[in-house]
Amino acid sequence: MEIELNSVYIEVIKEDITKSKMDCIVNAANTSLLGGGGVDGAIHRAGGKEILIECMRIREKQGGCPVGEAVITTAGKLDAKFVIHTVGPVWNNGKSNEEEKLKSCYINTLDLANQYDIKSIAFPNISTGIYKFPKKRAAEIAISSLREFIEGNNYSFRKIQFVCFDDDNYQIYLKTIKGFV
Ligand code: ADP
């Protein structure tokens, strides 16, 4: 399903994000930037060691990536040109500003992508796997953050995808995005 908002096509698809043809894919990383399970492991496996080498350089410079922030690397062997690694919050029953932190992931990623003149970007469902963020609330935050960004900034984007992996998230995103049409 696709909607158009301020000349940007926003699409919800069910796919393995490592197969994406977008300019940039987003990784739900952890603060170490050294790879992990879930989508993080899949991106590092498919993209090869170049991605990890750049992550290690960033670690040397700034000591990893704080929750809610984003860093950019090559995409190695993937079709994408760039990977933006952002660190989602671990769900703690809403007691640790998780909603604000998840919003920051989307806004900071979009901001960084814009600085690199990226035209198309694919987001996974950040924090909704191992980090256990409630999926419906996470989808609402993802879509409303995107809308806020493209209503308030000059940007280079033509296409933005929300790439769902599990069917639960796919159904939730389809329903949520319909509420934004
Ligand atoms: P987090 O630690 O931020 O929760 P996870 O990788 O555990 O990160 O999960 C984030 C989301 O990524 C989950 O919804 C999961 O289903 C999804 N996911 C896992 N593997 C892939 C993949 N190859 N492509 C796209 N999404 C994926």
Image: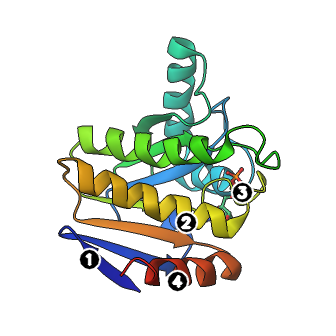
C-alpha gap between disc 3 and disc 2: 22 Å
Name the residue rendered at 63%, 44% in the picture.
Answer: 88
The residue identified by callout 4 is 174
Looking at the image, residue 56 lies above or below residue 172: above
Left/right placement of residue 141 relative to residue 119 reads right
Q: Secondary structure at mark 3?
A: helix
Measure how far apart labels 2 and 1 are at the Cα level.
17 Å
Q: Earlier in the sequence, mark 4 or mark 3?
A: 3
Q: Secondary structure at mark 2?
A: helix
Counting residues from the N terminus, which is met first, the one under dot 2 or under dot 1? 1
Disc 4 crowd rating (10 Å Cα; few below 14, some 14-19, many 20+) is some
Look at 46% across and 64% down and name the residue there.
143
Amino acid identity at mark 3: Gly
Q: Earlier in the sequence, mark 3 or mark 2?
A: 3
Which residue in the structure is indicated by mark 3? 38
Front of the two marks 1 and 3: 1
- The residue at 33%/41% (across/down) is 111
Q: CA distance from mark 1 to mark 3?
A: 30 Å
Numbered badge on residue 140: 2
